[in-house]
Image (cartoon, coloured by chain):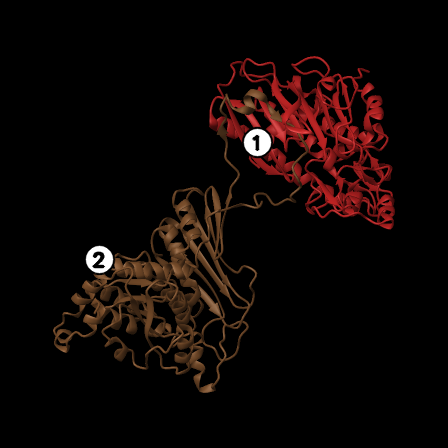
Amino acid sequence: MPVVQTLKRLLALCLLLANGGPSDYACASEPKRAAPAAQVFLETHTAMGTIFSIYLYAPTEREAHTVAQAAFDEVDRVEELLSNYRPSSELSRINREAALGPVVTDRETFAFVATSIGWSARTNGAFDITVGRLMKAWGFFRANGHVPSAAELAEAGRQMGWQKVILNSQERSVRFAADNVELDPGGIGKGYVVDRMVEMLRVEHVTSALISAGSSTIYAIGAPPGKRGWKVQIPDPEDHQRPISTVVLRDTSLSTSACTEKYFVLDGHRYCHIMNPHTLKPVEDMVQTTAIHPSATASDALSASLFVLGPEASLHLLKGMPEASALLLAGHGRVEHCTSVRWSDPEGGDVCHRTATKRNRKVEP
Amino acid sequence: MNRRDFLGGASASVLASGMLPLLAQDREKNVSPDDTFSVGVIGPGSRGQELIRQLLRIRGVRIAAVCDIYEPRFAEVDQLAGSPVPRYKDYRHMLERKDLDAIVVATPLYLHAEHVNAALNSGRAVYGEKSMGFTPEDSLSILRTVSETGKIFQVGHQYRYAPWFQDAVQRVRDLQIGKVTQIVAYWNRNADWRRPVPEPKDERLINWRLYREYSGGLLTELGSHHIDVANWVLGEQPIDVIGVGSIAVYHDGREVDDNVQVIFGYSEGRRMTFTSMTSNSLMGEQLWIYGTSGSLQLTLEDATFYYEPRPIHAVNPHSEMMQHGVTTGASFRAQGEMPYRGPGTRLATASGDDPTLVACRSFVDCVRGKKQPLADVQIGYAAAIAAACANRSIQSGRKEIIPPAPAAG
């Protein structure tokens, strides 16, 4: 790795640690270029089984390419750290060895696992990074979906559970309290890597950019010149021709969970890839959840958690997260129930009332 | 009496006067599309019979004569033609016929030059199977004969006539996948390449492809097609070649290798790698053409383009995204970790007729209209001499320089 790049990453990490977490970084790096960039560029990168995009204002294509590549290098670095598709990743090493005894790992990986377990505790297990075995039982690893038998489900249930992950912060070790536990970063990994990309771009003094990780997690740095922020459309699951809402993001992130891309159909029934760790089955009564939060790691984990929790429990969770906002569309295949929390878009009014859902409700906890 | 009947009755003095080439040229020019087109075939073996089958699908074409030294072929040709076809055991006797518009040469490789040159010198247009010549000298002699006689010669590189090859190669030449620097070509099968031999004495006659005296093996019989496509894509013949080969599976008395790996060098450091094996068919018969911005998978059935991830580009400020924003949604379907595979973009070019039929039809049209064929002698030379030099490299263990075609005239 070039020395300059290494130094930049160290600087980014220092800023992260000094400010206590990903959500605080926005004030860490003062933009040095006051003048808005003249032109927006788009660069894409394939990683983590999806496509990452960066829209970026920069004076020249060359400069845009240089900083975008620095961000994509960071994606590749994190993928090598956290991919459960790569046997060589640090997460895969933990998965192989942590049932045998404590696995000492690096600070970043330990912090990632600890953050994930924190989300499990916060959501009473609705978010569970040990969902890996359950995903495999349902065939969602490398896309080979099938309905597992009761025995298979029971076996998967014995092999998962966030309480089975024992962390020792003193020695930065991870241990599994049962055999065959497996960490799956699917519900939080893209958000985490987006936060790392944001750090990298801020270190590069980027003041206006939009990052998209396969469209499910999006982060807006600053705003396009002369605008309040970057527009993001939330699709109407029943009418792809028009969005259900358009929000304007500035120095914050948005994540969406839905079953529109990853699912399988058997005997006419559609099985979603998002698992309820309590029932050991795919979530059946949620269509789409979107969460906005200053941290992409948080919005990713939050949108997944809301999807599992359902409207009532989600409201309870969101009460304790004043910096978050959310839009939940519940129902069995069709949208039957709309819930918005601190949700505002330029059209104003209640987003849920504007939808064609059968039952509308708006709650401001 | 049509013109052919008249020519068929030309006097021996005319023939002896050396006017035959002129008369033959005249004949080619004046063949009516509705007129009968008489073909003589030298070597109606498996490939020769396939050419007969295709030629008989063209209006006006009749198989007027066949020549072979293997007696059972005649009955097979009669069966194909639906009626007895005049047969010859000596091609020179067949070429003495006055009513033949064109000659097809589909004999074993080592005889190509002898038969093609004789047919051209008899004043006929010739469709010669690939590889054009066995040795570099053979290919050069055909090149010279075509030049000296002015007769039409088409080489049996029928994929030059396949619509999806033409469409795909044009797109490559239009730089749709950037600058092509590498071509990797496979012609892999899982079969011993043997033909059944009714009488042991006929082993070399039937299985001539397996013996070095008659055949260039996998390189000439299969590889010459892919070499031709590489030449087509890269716009030139290769400069040099280095290769290896061995008999790894079929230790049955054959002399030619049952697997070969050859690297051809082109200008500007560009390369084409050809691999052929007879003990595994996974990769089949395909070329991968790699450019700086994409790849083309070209098979004997279809063409599929794959594009490298798009480099950075400027976004129109009035674009949908800039006006209305990006759309969030569930993440894309997990694809494992291999980037850039995806399904590719398969060309919608209709595959149309069998390339051999198109090639034969084009040949007949060229003879009737006195037009130069697409797969001409230069194309045949470039592929044949590359295949011949590749075999020399395998045998010598050294890199071989491939001589370019001499300047025209």
Q: Which residue was labeled with disc 1?
A: A70
Picture quarter with the C terminus of chain B: bottom left
Which secondary structure lies at badge 1? helix
Q: In which quarter of the image is residue B91?
A: bottom left
- CA distance for labels 2 and 1: 55 Å
Parent chain of label 1 = A
Q: Residue at x 47, y 28 (%)?
A: A62
Q: In which quarter of the image is residue A321?
A: top right
Depth check, mark 2 against mark 1: the one in front is 2
Q: Quadrant of residue A91?
A: top right
Q: Nearer the viewer, residue B324 or A19?
A: B324
Which residue type does callout 2 highlight?
Ala
Q: Nearer the viewer, residue B275 or A59?
A: B275
Q: The brown chain is which one?
A: B
Determine whether B272 is above or below B129 in the image: above
Q: Which residue was labeled with disc 2?
A: B408
Picture quarter with the N terminus of chain B: bottom left
Percent x, y of residue A149: 84, 50
Percent x, y of residue A158: 87, 45
Q: Are marks 2 and 1 on the same chain?
A: no
The local crowd at label 1, few if under 14, some if 14 to 19, many if 20 or more residues have their Cα within 10 Å, is: some
Determine whether B313 is above or below A143 in the image: above
Percent x, y of residue A128: 81, 35
Q: Which of B394 and A145 is in front in this view?
A: A145
Q: Residue at x 55, y 35 (%)?
A: A2
The local crowd at label 2, few if under 14, some if 14 to 19, many if 20 or more residues have their Cα within 10 Å, is: few
Question: Colour in which chain A is shown?
Answer: red
Would residue B265 be seen by someone viewing this image from the given angle? no
Parent chain of label 2 = B
Q: Residue at x 42, y 52 (%)?
A: B163
Which residue type does callout 1 highlight?
Ala
Which secondary structure lies at badge 2? loop
